Amino acid sequence: MRVALLSDIHGNLPALEAVLADMTRRGPYDQVAVAGDLVWAGPWPAEVVDRIRGLDALVIQGNTDAFLARQPAETPAGKRDDRFAEQLAWVTAQLGAERTAYLTSLPFSTHISPGPGCDLLVVHANPVDLERAILPDMSDAELAELLLAGPAADWMALAFGHLHVPFCRMWRGRLLADIASAGLPMGRDRRAVYAIMTCTAAAWSVEHHRVAYDADATAKRMRKSGMPRGKHFAERLLAANYEQ
């Protein structure tokens, strides 16, 4: 079984189109999955939602998708009240009510099961919540807290996004695969990232693929679109680093 996975598009339509073109070139697939964060921080939220909904894909919710169900005064931890309210107002205005409802009703996770003992669980951040990132250097105990507390811990591979840096790791005989970000990649590499996972002989493997696109043009659109904090997000996109 072959599964194409992408995550954290963040309203970046040119990056999404580049990823989908590369995915098509490397296809076919038995399933396509999108691990959340379709919008927020990018200038094409409505266009990205429409493009994703036009795919035959399993789509789950990310933390920024869940933001859209909040009231302006319900600021998430780690964000400034004024900035959150301004971004929320702009994104929801661009999306409209129907697209916003779609994002806020997405499921938390999805299972892909090609056969007994070969379940793939797809989540946004971890199997417990939408916020805590799985890090490549986490201890066994830290991983156990996040990975074994969920309602379904019988998976053999876990695919996730949220942390925008790709990695894979074996943990207690299970494969952990960070899909990373199609629309706002980190790791000091501007290229969009997605993953292909393959199950053969009851074991999963993962390939990460980076795809070039015109990040400079996207950064220019971020600055000129009227999106709140467009200059900040453009600088982060071009630096491809959390601390640009």
Image (spheres, rainbow, N blue to C red):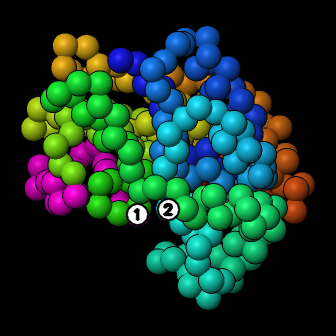
| Left or right relative to 145: residue 107 | right
| Left or right relative to 165: residue 215 | right
Residue under the point 59% across and 73% down: 69
What is the CA distance from the residue labelled 1 to the residue labelled 2? Answer: 6 Å
Residue 137 sits inside the magenta stretch: yes
Residue type at mark 2: give it: Asn
> Mark 1 near mark 2, Cβ–Cβ under 8 Å?
yes
Q: Secondary structure at mark 1?
A: loop
Q: Which mark is residue 36?
A: none
Above/below status of 12 relative to 98: above
Residue under the point 56% across and 53% down: 37
Can you tell which quarter of the image residue 79 is in?
bottom right
Residue under the point 84% across and 55% down: 223
Image quarter (top left, top right, bottom left or bottom right) of the N terminus: top left
- Magenta part of the chain: 131-151
Can you tell which quarter of the image residue 218 is in?
top right
Q: Which residue is mark 2?
A: 63
Secondary structure, magenta segment, majority class = loop
Q: Which residue is mark 1?
A: 131
- Check disc 2: other Cα within 10 Å, few if <14, some if 14-19, many if 20+: many
Farthest residue, direction bottom: 73
User: Which of the marked residues, 1 or 2, is nearer the chain's N terminus?
Assistant: 2
| Left or right relative to 81: residue 119 | left
Q: Secondary structure at mark 2?
A: helix
Residue 75 sits inside the magenta stretch: no
Residue under the point 50% across and 30% down: 32
Q: Position of residue 36 (x, y in %)?
A: 52, 50
| Left or right relative to 206: residue 232 | right
